[in-house]
Image: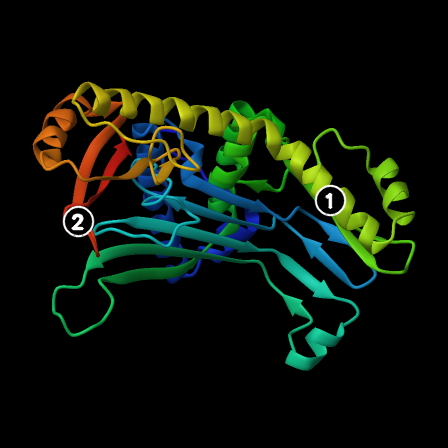
Amino acid sequence: MKYLKTYEGFWGNLARLSPERKENDEKAVQLFHDISNDFEKYGSDLKKIKIVDRGGTNISLNNLTIGKNYTINYVFGKYHPIKRDVFSSNIEHGDRRVIIDNIPFFIVLKKNELEKAFNTSRIKLTNVTVNDIKNFENLDGTQKQRFNEKVDKYNISSDIANQLFDYFIEEFNIQYPDLKSSKYKNSMSIKNIEKGIKPIIKHIEVKGKDGRLLTFDLRLGDNEQEIRKMLSNMTESEYDVFWKKRRKELHEPSDKKEEEYKKEICGKISEILKNCDINLEPVKFNEFGFGRATVNEYEIVVEFTSNDPEIEFKLHNAIKIMQNIDGYEFKSKRIMDGYSDKNMKFIILHFEKK
């Protein structure tokens, strides 16, 4: 997406008769160019995006909705599951994130209790809001938070926003066709697909045998009619048993693979330590002698103890060898004295994915 197509639409052109809307739309076009360039620069990585697609035109007894209904979240820079993920609140100096909300035209035909309580309007025109958020470090020392936000918020025309939405939907359909029927397209759903877990298509509610309302996540390949029939014949306690079994079936294969990979990584680190004359005794939960071991997509953290008086020298030599463990770069080490035994050292090694 090197550039946006020429935007033309009757309502958009009508709205752009307003100088303010025309200026906002031009600003949005430049923003979308920035997004396009950033997206291509970092390998068209869709983990940087979260789309909630709430569907299009809808007619019901309560309301009439016309137009696309969605939210797009985009984070600039190279994707990182902690520092640059739309689900993460962790931010750094210079981070930039964009949120686009498209609320379609709707008419409330029959007000519900919530709308009556808040006296909401029965007719609302299409509204597209852009929040362009830039983070910068708080250097004046007068506030508690480390970062401040500069938010540029403005309304734009839907024919502009829909081009970005359509482009990313098409990109998701190409890269992850299994997500085509899902209204949730984001890093979490992508990771589940990569683990072999089928995506959620929609949520259903069924009244169980004891009259309780049972909720269920329908996934790609599920037979909705069969599941509804099965749930209607279940009590709430039976459903709880079924749900736990279902969850185990979904996650057990990927959990097993993750545990095997963790064991492989711990074995590699243990072998390097052993070659540097750092011998660890097996502990209850880890055969390699690590009191704590964390291995995930972005970091490795291992913790162990030693009463070897030469541990710091030996560890220095070991770190030279393990600068890179299976794509994880050595980040830091911490060596702390024991509380009751000053000869005992607590050591934490931290590696981070490139």
Q: Quadrant of the N terminus?
A: top left
Find residue 206 and name its label: none
- What secondary structure is marked by label 1? helix
96 sits to left or right of 168: left
Is residue 128 or residue 322 the one in the foreground? 322
Which class describes the residues within 10 Å of circle 2: few (<14), some (14-19), or many (20+)? few
Is residue 128 or residue 309 the one in the foreground? 309
Earlier sequence position, callout 2 versus callout 1:
1
Is residue 323 or residue 281 the one in the foreground? 281
Say which residue appears at 64% left-offset and 75% top-offset.
Answer: 120
Q: Position of residue 325 (x, y in %)?
A: 27, 23
Say which residue appears at 67% left-offset and 68% top-offset.
Answer: 123
Say which residue appears at 73% left-offset and 44% top-offset.
Answer: 243
- Let me know if residue 2 appears in the view: yes
Find residue 243 and name its label: 1
The answer to which image quadrant residue 229 occupies is top right
Which class describes the residues within 10 Å of circle 1: few (<14), some (14-19), or many (20+)? few
Q: Position of residue 7 (x, y in %)?
A: 46, 40
350 sits to left or right of 98: left
Q: How many marks?
A: 2
Q: Quadrant of the C terminus?
A: top left
Looking at the rendered structure, the kind of residue marked 2 is: Met
Q: Position of residue 339 (x, y in %)?
A: 21, 56
Is residue 339 or residue 212 the one in the foreground? 339
Residue 342 against residue 256 in the figure, above or below: below
61 sits to left or right of 153: right
- What secondary structure is marked by label 2? strand
Say which of marks 2 and 1 sits in front: 2
- Let me know if residue 326 appears in the view: no
Find residue 336 and name its label: 2
Looking at the rendered structure, the kind of residue marked 1 is: Trp
